[in-house]
Image (spheres, grey):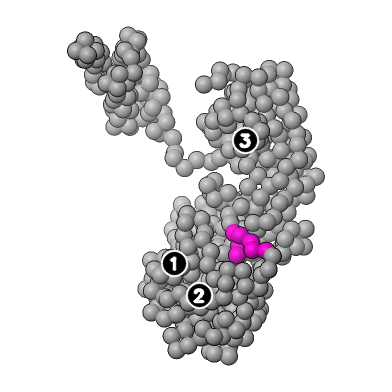
Amino acid sequence: MPEDNAAKARQLRQLPAVDRVLSLLEPSPAVQDFPRKVLVRSIQETLEALRARIQDGQGPLDQSEMEASQVARRAVNRANRAMQPNLRRTINATGVVVHTNLGRSRLADVAMPQLQDIACHYSNLEYDLETGKRGSRYEAVAELLCEVTGAEAGLVVNNCAAAVLLTLDTLARDREVIVSRGELVEIGGSFRVPDIMAKSGARLREVGTTNRTHRRDYAGAIGDQTAMLLKVHQSNFSISGFTKAVGLDELVALGREHQLPVVEDLGSGTFIDFSRYGLFAEPTVQASVRTGADIVTFSGDKLLGGPQAGILVGRKKWIERLKANPLTRALRIDKMTLTAFESTLRLYRDETRAVETIPTLRMLTEPLAVTTARAERLAARLETLAGRGLAITSAATVARAGGGALPLLEIPSRCLQVQHANWRAREIERFMRGQPTPIIGRIENDRFVLDLRTVQEDELNHIEAAFRNLLEKEPQ
């Protein structure tokens, strides 16, 4: 043991000083664009990693690893990684259209010029150009929201959970909100409707059972402490079999009878009827407004295909009360989100154009023949590499909507299954994640799978280049 400790001490003393490594690097053109503190930190972290290997008893280091030139090389690699943006573009080849981990919905290309213009210049965010006085940021989208949905008024906050929180805090603090037990959902990140309700100060009043709730359950629970009736759309799960739910129309009639506001949280929310495109019917925002819901809340991204935001539309008297709540300022959206949402909303003036230009809608409704043709084009490009150990198989598969929406929907799709003589599927998957433009696929039956429904035409070049890179490497 004393001998081991002595050996470790000798190797620790042989490690070069930070200044010594820095003196080798600073004249190099390869690091001229690196801030000095990034370079110093990278050298320090490289040396610390070597010290940890020595002290942890992982065996003596090779003499070459402790040379200043080798430490410098590793430090440059570390500095390069440190200079890369943490938030990076990826290629979604998972087949999940609204992929929460990959940024949910992609914005339409036509939204980009306006977004860049507003982001890089001053704007009339809260300035009325007609009066020359202070204005409201919400006016940029309020009129469009009313035009698209048919509502009297609209408001936008930073996400749908915030929209629900604001509604409950404004209309039901210290009072009861009646909800069916079958609608007490949990959304992504372990956020639950009861938790949001508790945070708002409202009191939950559950009615019915998990699978069956009747109008009489709501009616029997209404009392002096009732503030509202809340309906939550089961957008991320489904209950089938012996079930019964109270429709929004029945709930609206009950609310009118007792002079109580009726709020519907649609979760994902959509402006188009997906059944017209051969998909499952999903309640539209317009239908909820026509049915008479006082407030409808839904997401700006997900099925809408815009930026992350929480949308509230409904009767003007209720929306005005929400606007007057100080919490609205804490939950408000910034100019970039506002601009992206306005550009997305404008596309919904023409449904055909919206489906063609909003990526989420296009991927969900794209005919299988189009996806298959794209898969064949990529397969043809990768098959030129097949003689180098790569095997490509085209196969039918199923894509998903994702984002907590349309949980039962299975979208016919086409995928490429990739195998290699020297690479296991997990090694290929890891290599693809490490590319300059990371490619995120999935693994099935020890094959790396690329689902072409969520891959765009301009991404085929990146995928081909990544496989060329793979064939030049040895598996790790």
Disc 1 crowd rating (10 Å Cα; few below 14, some 14-19, many 20+) is: some
Which numbered disc flags the more N-terminal residue, 1 or 3? 1
Disc 3 crowd rating (10 Å Cα; few below 14, some 14-19, many 20+) is: some
Name the residue carrying label 1: 196
Whether the residues at callouts 2 and 1 have beta carbons within 8 Å, the answer is no
Tell which residue pokes out farthest to the right in this image: 369
Q: What is the secondary structure assignment of the residue under circle 1?
A: helix
Magenta segment main secondary structure: loop
Residue range corresponding to the magenta coloring: 234-240
- Decide if residue 289 is in sight here: no
Which label sits in the foreground, 2 or 1? 2
| Residue 333 as seen in the image, left or right of residue 31 | right
Q: Residue at x 58, y 90 (%)?
A: 257
Q: Residue at x 22, y 14 (%)?
A: 1
Q: What is the secondary structure assignment of the residue under circle 2?
A: strand
Which label sits in the foreground, 3 or 2? 2
- Position in image of residue 321 (x %, y %): 45, 80
Name the residue carrying label 3: 443
Residue 146 marker: none
Q: Amino acid at mark 2?
A: Glu
| Residue 151 as seen in the image, left or right of residue 136 | right
Which numbered disc flags the more N-terminal residue, 2 or 1? 1
Q: What is the secondary structure assignment of the residue under circle 3?
A: strand
